[in-house]
Amino acid sequence: MSEILFADDDDALRRMIGELLRHAGHSVRLAENGHEALAEVRRAAPDLVILDYRMGTPDGFTVCRTIKDDPRVAHVPVLILTGESRIEDRLGGFEAGADDYLAKPFDARELLARVTALLRQAQRALDRNPTTGLPGGVAIEREIDRRRADGAPFAMVYFDLDDFKPFADRFGFAVADEAIREAGRSIAATAEGRTDTFVGHVGGDDFVLVCPAEDGRELARIARARFSQALPHHLPKDAVRAGVYTAADRSGVEREFALTRLSAAVIRVDPARWTSLEHLGERVAEAKHRAKTPGSAGIAEAEL
C-alpha cells in the first residue's frame, strides 16, 4: 500500500479525490493548504504528493519547489493538478520540479493511471544503485522469484572484485569507484541484447547476472575479460606495467597484490530443489572462496 498526500483548499474536491485514492488501495493523507502540505511532508515523507496549483499562499508551485529543494524529501514524486490551460502555467509546474502535471477537468481513470506510473517510477529509482544505475536488492530478489516460478533451471553468476579494500587504499576512492562502474559496465555489456539475461548490483563491488543455466560460465568468462581490458585505463601506467602494487593487508602488513580482477561464482539453480535464499547464499560463498584461491581461473561453479 502506497501513502499519498493530497493538498487542495477545495473541501469537496479534497474529499472526493481522497476517497478515489483510498478505493484504489492507497493510504491517503489530506491537507487543506500549502502550509499543511509542507508540514505533513516534513513530518513523514509520503510515497507521492498531489498538489492543486491554485490553493492560496503558498500555491502548489511554491510547495513543489520547496519539496524539491529539500534533500531529505526531494526524491518524493509530485503531481500538480491545475485548471489553468496556458502553456506558461504548465511550464511553471515543471520548472518548479513537478514530476507530472494533470489539467482539470480530468477523468478519474487518468488520475489513477498517472498515480500508478509515478509510484512505479519512484520505486524503480529508489531500487537502482546510485553508482552504476543497475537494479538493486529488491529487483534482484524479484528476478530470482520469477525464475523459480517459471520452473526452468537457471544460473546465477555472482561477481565481485578481488582484494578490493587494499586496491581502494592504494589507488584512492575515485579509482575504486571507477573500478566498480567499470565492473557494472562490463557485466551489463555482456548481457546486452539478451532478453533472457538480468544484471543487478547488490552493492559495493558485488554484482549478479541471472541467465539460462547453460550460459552462466561463458557469460562470466566474457564479463571478466571485458573488465580486465577496461580497468588499466583507470590506473597509473607504472602499476599496469608491473601488474602488482604494494598495500597493507587486513592484518596491516605491507605486501604485494595483483591488480584486482573480477571473480565469478556460477551457481546453477534447479527450482525443483530450491530451499531458501540463505542456502543460495551459502553456495555462493563456497564458490566465491574457490574462485579466489591462488592459481584458480577466477571462476568456480556449484549447483543448488
Image: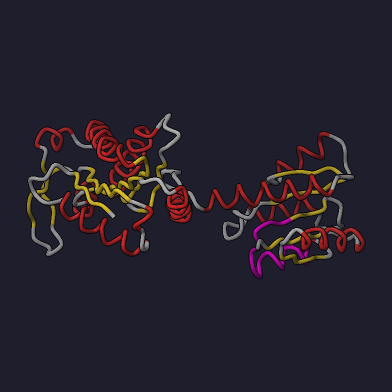
Residue 282 image offset from top left, x and y in percent = 27, 62
Image quarter of the N terminus: bottom right
Q: What secondary structure is the magenta-colored segment mainly?
A: helix
Q: Residue 45 lies in magenta, yes or no?
A: yes
Q: Residue at x 82, y 34 (%)?
A: 87
Residue 29 image offset from top left, x and y in percent = 75, 66
Please tell me which residue lies in front, 199 or 150.
150
In the rendered view, tell whether residue 251 sits above or below residue 187: below
Q: Residue at x 30, y 60 (%)?
A: 281
Left or right of 51: which side holds 123?
A: left
- Tell me the magenta residue range: 35-49
Residue 62 image offset from top left, x and y in percent = 75, 53
Image quarter of the C terminus: bottom left
Left or right of 294: which side holds 232?
A: right
Q: Quadrant of residue 9?
A: bottom right
Please tell me which residue lies in front, 269 or 27.
269
Residue 126 image offset from top left, x and y in percent = 53, 53
In the rendered view, tell whether residue 138 sits above or below residue 220: below
Q: Residue at x 54, y 49 (%)?
A: 125
Q: Is residue 129 visible?
A: no
In the rendered view, tell whether residue 299 sits above or below residue 223: below
Please tell me which residue lies in front, 71 or 48.
48
Please tell me which residue lies in front, 177 or 58.
177
